[in-house]
Image (tube, helix red, strand yellow):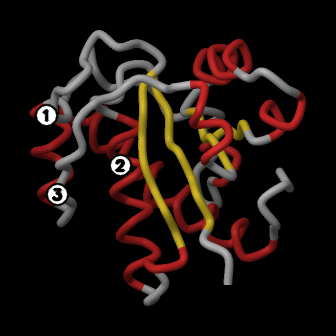
C-alpha cells in the first residue's frame, strides 16, 4: 500500500498546523494505521522558523494527550512534489498556498481542513494566537473532528484526488 503524504499548513506553523499534524498522527495511530501516513506541517511565513509550537497550544494539546515536538518551518516549493495533499487551515492559507503552487496539479493538492469537519459547521480553523484558552480548545475540537473526516477521505481517494 502506498504511503499517503500530508502536509498541514497555517501562517506561522506554531499553533494550528503543528496541532493538526499531531492530532491526525494520533487519529491514525489509534486505528493501527500510522505506518500508512507520512505527516508534516509548515507555515507560510518563516518568522518562527526553528521554534516549538506556541506554549499555550502545547499546554492545551498536552491536556488531551498530544505532545507537540515539531519545530516550525516554512513551506517550500519541494513540498508540493513530496506531499499528496497540502492542507490549509483557512482561506488566507489557501490563497498563500495557491500562490506557491507552480502547476495545476500542485494546486489540486491544496485542501481546506474545515472541509473534513463532520460534527462542527465552522468554515475554517481559526487562528487562536491572539485569543484565550477557549480559542485553543476550540481549535483542538475542530482538529479532532476534521482528522476523523480526513481519515475517511484518505480511505476513499488516490493521491491525485480532492474533495
Q: Measured from the top left, where is residue 121 in percent x and y?
A: 64, 45
Left or right side of 109 for 40: left
The residue under the point 47% across, 49% down is 142
Q: Position of residue 128 (x, y in %)?
A: 32, 26
Precedes in sequence: disc 2 or disc 3: 3
Q: Which residue is mark 3?
A: 67
Q: Residues within 10 Å of mark 2 (few under 14, many from 20)?
A: many
Element type at mark 1: helix
**Numbered disc in front, either 2 or 3:** 3
**Which residue is tagged 2?**
140
Q: How many marks?
A: 3
Q: What residue is pinned by disc 1?
A: 56
Alpha-carbon neighbours of circle 1 within 10 Å: few (<14), some, or many (≥20)? some
| Nearest-to-viewer mark from 3 and 1 | 3
81 up-or-down from 25: above or below: above
Residues at marks 3 and 1, CA–CA distance in whole angstroms: 12 Å
* Whole-percent x, y for residue 157 in the image: 81, 67
- Element carrying mark 3: loop
- Badge 2 vs badge 1, beta-carbon distance below 8 Å: no
Amino acid at each position: 500500500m502506498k504511503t499517503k503524504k500530508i502536509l498541514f499548513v497555517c501562517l506561522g506553523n506554531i499553533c494550528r498546523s503543528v496541532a493538526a499534524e499531531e492530532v491526525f498522527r494520533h487519529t491514525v495511530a489509534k486505528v493501527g494505521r500510522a505506518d500508512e501516513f507520512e505527516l508534516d506541517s509548515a507555515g507560510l511565513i518563516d518568522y518562527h522558523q526553528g521554534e516549538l509550537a506556541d506554549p499555550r497550544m502545547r499546554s492545551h494539546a498536552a491536556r488531551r494527550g498530544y505532545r507537540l515536538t515539531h519545530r516550525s518551518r516554512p513551506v517550500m516549493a519541494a513540498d508540493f512534489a513530496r506531499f499528496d495533499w497540502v492542507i490549509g487551515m483557512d482561506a488566507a492559507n489557501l490563497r498563500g498556498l495557491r500562490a506557491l503552487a507552480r502547476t495545476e496539479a500542485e494546486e489540486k493538492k491544496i485542501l481546506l481542513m474545515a472541509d473534513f469537519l463532520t460534527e462542527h459547521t465552522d468554515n475554517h480553523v481559526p487562528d487562536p494566537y491572539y485569543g484565550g484558552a477557549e480559542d485553543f480548545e476550540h481549535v483542538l475540537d475542530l482538529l479532532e473532528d476534521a482528522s476523523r473526516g480526513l481519515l475517511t477521505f484518505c480511505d476513499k481517494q488516490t493521491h491525485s484526488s480532492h474533495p
